[in-house]
Image: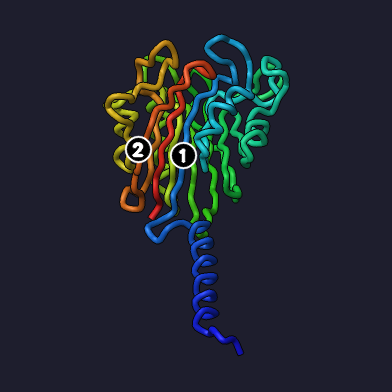
Amino acid sequence: MSRHPGRLVALALLTLGSASCAVLSQLGSPQGVEVTAVTYNIRHGAGMDDSLRLERTAAALRPLAADFIALQEVDRNVNRSNKVDQARLLGDLLGMKSAFGAFMDYQGGEYGLAILSKWPIVRSTPLRLPDGNEPRVALLVQVTLADGSPLTVVCVHFDWVSNDNFRYAQAKVLAATLDTLSTPYLLMGDFNDEPGSRTIRLFERGAMEAEKPAANHFTFPAAPAPEKEIDFIFVSPAKRWRVDSVAVVDERMASDHRPVVAKVVLR
């Protein structure tokens, strides 16, 4: 028998407490699961200098330590981007899983959007949207978070022409689909529309925007200084989420958009 049974008990409790803290750290705090979400239109890896450097894109994203990244203007096996599967390569460079949704065939490959995920992807579903100036899809990815909670991550890139009829038609189809989801969702992307537009108002009805700081809310063009706010992150249902911080990242060269990063908590 130990001469110091009290010390052994204390050591055992300390060890158990440390193990419990490690488990809680993996599963999220009792207040919810912390999620870092990023949206970035990467312009197929071509920067403001028109140089195609996907490693530069990854370098812009790496410090953000995202759980989920919604990417727009992504090539897969396209001639102009050296026949690279850009979503998969960026996923490899960042240590994340990837899913791709094709808008259309382009230069021997496909052009579309993608989602990168730190967590296993259970299902990936492209949702065909009404055609506009170009074909469009939204990409819906179902994931399982560390605590076992299901989450749907959605990436969009709506039509870009000034007349919003195409854009709003695409938004209505997506909004109707989102209304049918049984899981919480993150909606991110290049909406090609600004606050107050009917496209943005449509999503505000069913979701909560992760609002950017008033002093730093413009996202396009990346340089010399952005003048429009067209990239957004929404969460739904609002009562399940807390938005802790949102920022437009001061990245001026890797693309013609700036990334948006939000730290949110799913409760």
Classify residue 114 by image quadrant.
top right
Badge 1: few (under 14), some or many (20 or more) residues near its Cα, within 10 Å? many
Q: Which residue ends up furthest to the bottom in the rendered image?
A: 1
Vertical placement of 75 versus 203: above or below?
A: above
The residue identified by callout 1 is 37
Q: In which quarter of the image is the N terminus?
A: bottom right
Q: Can residue 183 be seen in this view?
A: yes
**Which residue shows up at 53% across the image and 74% down it?**
11
Residue 158 has which mark? none
Residue at 54%, 83% (x, y): give it. Answer: 4
Q: Which amino acid does label 1 sit on?
A: Ala
Frontmost residue, 111 versus 214: 214
> x, y (%) of residue 210?
35, 37
Q: Is residue 138 left or right of residue 209?
A: right
Label 2 crowd (10 A; few <14 / some 14-19 / many >=20): many
Q: Is residue 74 left or right of residue 28?
A: right
Quadrant in the picture for residue 233: top left
Number of labelled discs? 2
Kindly tell me whether residue 165 is visible in this rendering.
no
Specify the amino acid type for callout 2: Ala
Residue at the limit of the structure toward the front, as seen here: 3
**Pointers 2 and 1 in contact (CB under 8 A)?**
yes
Q: Is mark 2 on a helix, strand or loop?
A: loop
Distance between the Cα atoms at labels 2 and 1? 10 Å
Q: Position of residue 175 (x, y in %)?
A: 39, 39
Secondary-structure class at tag 1: strand
Q: Residue 210 bears which disc, if any? A: 2
**What's the residue at 36%, 39% (across, down)?**
245
Q: Residue 221: percent from the left, percent from the top?
A: 42, 15
Task: Report the colour scheme.
Answer: rainbow
The residue depicted at 47 percent of the width and 32 percent of the height is 39
Where 230 falls versus 69 (above or below)?
A: above
